[in-house]
């Protein structure tokens, strides 16, 4: 098709805001947004996360009030992350396998009060290990197969607690198949698996590691033996393909903004529900730039629409509640 001026004046489609909205190719609504939530042991009320402006950790006594606020904004899904007492961390992350740990108690509490809320539960050992790695460290190397055994047990505990979606974020080989098999055999056939299939060894994770108190444990150690190199794209496609073959219902690309090409390719190639995570570093950069007057706050919406344009079916973002309130206020 050839379009030539003056018969085609593309600016006619930008004549005013109503026409721009009418022909918009992508729109954002509350159902597209997922709010991450941090719950901390031995905390009364809440406390701010210094590296993430306006984001808090919540004690189990205050989590229901925060969740109610999230739901009131129009959000239908949360992703929940634990902040473990330092005295409960060890080399094996054994607290992850405690059926009465803080995350299991919190999921049960939330589900009792808000049964329709969709809860995504993170599957990884880094919040629980004394060394800060996502798996079991044996001879200074994260052992893949031993870690998978722990992740399977952790997944079953989270499913039994009431999590709707199990989200392995560890990047161990073969863990999706083992988790899916265990869920099937334990009568959790309807528990979804959201695989962090394309998770990169990124420097954008710093504030999150502060939030769950794992940065000090990790120190200068690297996760490069299991998280992917930022230079690679074909590798991401292989990771996604394998996870789908093993039983993933949804796949994730993480981080978000620097990896929109990966997001687009995954969605176009596999046509499976595909999520993106606008991670803590992305959030903090934008938030601080807005607070200093370097960027207009509308840049938040611009980034989120960018995820949708690239193919994201949903977006984990610390802006979720804020943007959802804005969306619903304007309706």
Image: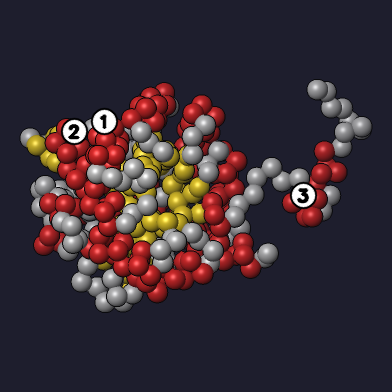
Q: Nearer the viewer, mark 1 or mark 2?
A: 1
- Residue 275 location, x and y as percent? 46, 43
In the image, 252: left or right of 291? left
In the image, 12: left or right of 164? right
Label placed on residue 22 = 3
Q: Residues within 10 Å of mark 1 (few under 14, many from 20)?
A: some
Say which residue appears at 62% left-offset and 65% top-offset.
328
- In the rendered image, which quarter is residue 143 located in? top left
Q: Are marks 1 and 2 in contact (CB under 8 Å)?
A: yes
- Residue 246 location, x and y as percent? 33, 30
Q: Quadrant of the N terminus?
A: top right
Say which residue appears at 18% left-offset and 33% top-offset.
144
Q: Secondary structure at mark 2?
A: helix
In the image, 96: left or right of 288? left
Q: Secondary structure at mark 1?
A: loop
- Residue 71 location, x and y as percent? 48, 66
- Residue 230 location, x and y as percent? 38, 33
Which one is earlier in the sequence, the residue at label 1 or at label 2? 2
- Between 261 and 296, the residue placed more toward the observer is 261
């Amino acid at each position: 098709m050839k379009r030539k001026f003056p018969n085609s004046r593309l600016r006619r489609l930008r004549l005013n805001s109503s026409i721009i909205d009418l022909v918009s190719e992508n729109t954002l609504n509350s159902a597209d947004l997922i709010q991450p939530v941090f719950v901390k042991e031995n905390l009364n009320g809440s406390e701010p996360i210094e590296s993430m402006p306006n984001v808090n950790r919540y004690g189990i006594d205050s989590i229901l009030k925060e969740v109610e606020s999230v739901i009131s904004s129009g959000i239908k899904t949360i992703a929940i992350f634990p902040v473990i007492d330092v005295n409960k961390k060890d080399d094996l992350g054994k607290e992850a396998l405690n059926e009465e740990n803080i995350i299991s108690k919190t999921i049960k509490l939330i589900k009792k009060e808000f049964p329709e809320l969709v809860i995504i539960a993170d599957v990884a050992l880094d919040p629980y290990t004394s060394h800060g790695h996502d798996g079991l460290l044996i001879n200074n190397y994260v052992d893949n197969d031993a870690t998978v055994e722990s992740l399977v047990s952790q997944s079953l505990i989270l499913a039994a607690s009431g999590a709707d979606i199990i989200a392995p974020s560890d990047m161990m080989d073969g863990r999706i198949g083992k988790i899916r098999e265990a869920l099937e055999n334990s009568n959790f056939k309807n528990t979804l698996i959201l695989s962090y299939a394309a998770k990169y060894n990124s420097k954008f994770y710093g504030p999150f590691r502060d939030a769950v108190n794992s940065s000090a444990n990790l120190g200068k150690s690297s996760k490069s033996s299991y998280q992917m190199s930022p230079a690679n794209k074909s590798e991401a496609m292989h990771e996604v393909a394998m996870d789908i073959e093993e039983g993933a219902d949804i796949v994730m690309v993480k981080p978000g903004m620097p990896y929109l090409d990966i997001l687009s390719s995954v969605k176009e190639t596999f046509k499976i529900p595909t999520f993106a995570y606008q991670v803590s570093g992305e959030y903090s950069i934008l938030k601080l730039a807005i607070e200093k007057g370097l960027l207009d706050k509308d840049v938040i919406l611009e980034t989120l629409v960018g995820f949708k344009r690239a193919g994201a079916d949903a977006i984990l973002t610390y802006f979720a509640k804020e943007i959802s309130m804005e969306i619903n206020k304007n309706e």
